[in-house]
Image (spheres, rainbow, N blue to C red):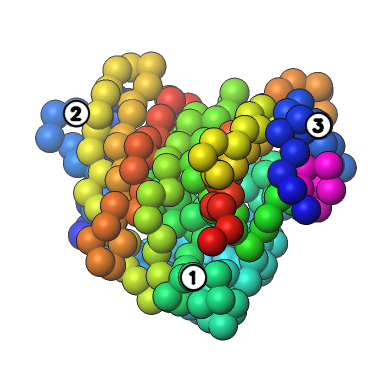
Amino acid sequence: MAFNPECLGRRYEAGPQIVDRERHRAYLRAVWDGADWEPSRPLATFASVYLLWPIVPLLFSDPEVGLDLPRLLHGEQDFWFDRPVQFEEQLSPSGEITRAEERRGMVFLELTCTGRDEGGHDTAHSRSLFLVRSAP
Amino acid sequence: MRATVPLMSMPPGAGVEPPELSVHLSQARINEYAEASGDHNPIHLDPDFARAVGLPSTIAHGLLTMAAAAAPLEQWSAEVAYVSRISCRFSAPVPSGDRISGQPKVRDASAERVVLALEARNGSGEPALTKAEMELRPL
C-alpha cells in the first residue's frame, strides 16, 4: 500500500467522548509516580485519550491514506485548550489531515483534531506530526 | 524527585523553580499506559516485534513520555493555573526501563501566562523531548 499525498484535507469524526474520571484515574496511575494525588481537572495530556485516540485509528486504517504503520514514528505533539476541560463533560472529536507530503522517501503527515463541547464550542485541540521512514 | 513548594501565585515569584523531573518508565508502566490510553502498538509491548522493526527493545509511547514529564508540573501549578498549551518534539526513543530526567525552567512569566520549558533526556542522556513547552494560564 503506497502513501497517497492527495489525502490532504481528509476529515474524520468520532462519536461524543466523555472525559471520564475513572479512566483518568487509570491514566494517572500510568503517568504519575508521585504521592497520592486526585486532580480536580484532567491532565492536559489526557486529551490524547478523549480527543486524539478516537481519531487516530480512523486515520491509520484509512486505505485512501496508505500509511506503512510498522515504519511510522510520532514526531511532534501539541495540545491546546480554549478553557479548562472538566471531568464528565462530553466532547465530540473531529480530525483533518493538514499536511501530507513525501520528501526524500520520508512521509510527513500532520493530523489536526478539535474537540467541540455540547454547546458547540471548540474546546480542545491537538496537532500531531507523524513520520514514516522509508523502507530499507 | 526533589520536594518543591507548589506554585502559589501567577506569575511565579523570583527564585521559584519548577520541580525536577525524574521518572522511571518501566515496561509495567508502559503496559499500564497502553491499557489506559488504548494505544496498543506492538513496538511498545512486544520485544520481538520491536527488534523486527529495528529497535533495540520496546520503547515508551511518546505520549507517555510527554505525560510523565508534564504531570509533576501540572501538580505543581494546579491550584492557581491550568495548562492552556503543551507541545513537544519526540527527538529520541525512550527504551523500556529508562529513567527520563530534566530540570524544567520558567521561560516567560506575566500575569496572563507562564511558559515553562520541559526538555527531558532518556537514560542514555539523549534529548528525548525537545522544543517542549507548557503554557499555564491563571484559573
Q: Position of residue B86 (x, y in %)?
A: 46, 36
* Mark 1 or mark 2, earlier in chain: 2
Give me the C-alpha separation between circle 1 and circle 2. Answer: 47 Å
Residue depth check, mark 3 versus mark 2: number of the one nearer the observer:
3
Nearest to the observer: residue B105 or residue B99: B99
Q: Name the residue carrying label 3.
A: A11
User: What is the C-alpha distance between the residues marked 3 and 2?
Assistant: 45 Å
Query: In which chain is the residue bearing label 2?
Result: B
Q: Does residue A78 lie above or below B48 as drawn? A: above
**Mark 3: which amino acid?**
Arg
Residue at position x 31%, y 34% in the image: B116
Q: Is residue A1 left or right of residue A133?
A: right
Callout 1 and callout 2 share a chain: yes
The magenta stretch spans residue A64? yes
Residue identified by numbered label 1: B54
- Number of numbered tags placed on the structure image: 3
Viewer-nearest residue: A130 or A42:
A130
Range of the magenta residues? A61-66
